[in-house]
Image (cartoon, grey):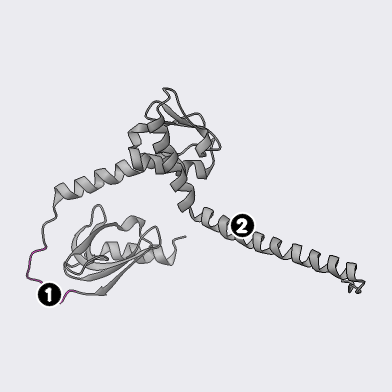
Amino acid sequence: MATAATVDVVNAVNDCFSIGSTVLCTNCFKEEVEGEVLAFDHNTKMLILKCHSKTTEDLSDVYVMNLSLCSNVQVIKECNGNFIDDPQKLNLEQVKMRLRKTLERRQDYLKSKNADVSPEAQELYRAIAKQLGSHEVSWQGQNIQILNEVTVSPPYRVDNVVSSSDNETACNYIKRIIKQFFITRPSAALENTHGTASSSSASVSPSSSSLSSSNAASGSPVPAN
């Protein structure tokens, strides 16, 4: 049985969007995208929207929406029919370049995946690859192989960095990346906070013990808890 959201999308797709109209779409990531219609292809159900830029007022963001993957499509404002200016032509070369970079980033992310290691190790792999380039980093079992000579083995700390050619310069550089990684990780900051709280609690105990010992030595009664 078709859901209400699916019916709304089908009805919207069956209609032709007028250039200049304002449309609101909810994509498969539950993100709402609202913008002005630049183009619509009925056969492929691809809708191109010009939206306000999130970074600067002088530019606009262009979204290509696949309506087959949208859960909701609403026409917020119809074009009044006085749309005279032709839509600005897209820079296809720039679009291809951005697509290529997006695919490369996705491929680099997939290379960092390893079912035999922890998510933390995979994050460290990506941090090293970001500094040196994905082509210089690879998995060798559970070990991270870097520059074909430096290896980082579990548990992936500074002490686990070794070089097959005793290249201290390369080892020290990788160690700095690892140190920075564990310092800046959100979980590391949380662990430090918990560690500080534990230390504070522990510091109270000796004072209590000292107080009890003092009372006992002076013959003063110690109240029972």
Residue 48 in sight here: no
Q: Is the residue under label 1 in contact with that under label 2 (CB below 8 Å)?
A: no
Mark earlier in primary sequence (2, 1)? 1
Identify residue type, mark 2: Gly
- Indicate the position of residue 151 as horizontal and vertical percent values: 46, 30
Identify residue type, mark 1: Gly
- Indicate the position of residue 119 as horizontal and vertical percent values: 51, 44
Q: Secondary structure at mark 2?
A: helix
Residue sitting at 52 percent across and 57 percent down?
189
Q: Which mark is residue 81?
A: 1
Residue 78, by quadrant, is bottom left
The region drawn magenta spans 79-87
Q: Which mark is residue 195?
A: 2
Q: Secondary structure at mark 1?
A: loop
**Label 1: few (<14), some or many (≥20) within 10 Å?**
few
Residue sitting at 23 percent across and 48 percent down?
98
Residue 145, by quadrant, is top left
82 is within the stretch colored magenta = yes
**Residue placed most toward the observer, 215 or 208:** 215
Residue sitting at 33 percent across and 44 percent down?
105
**Residue placed most toward the observer, 218 or 132:** 218
**Label 2: few (<14), some or many (≥20) within 10 Å?**
few
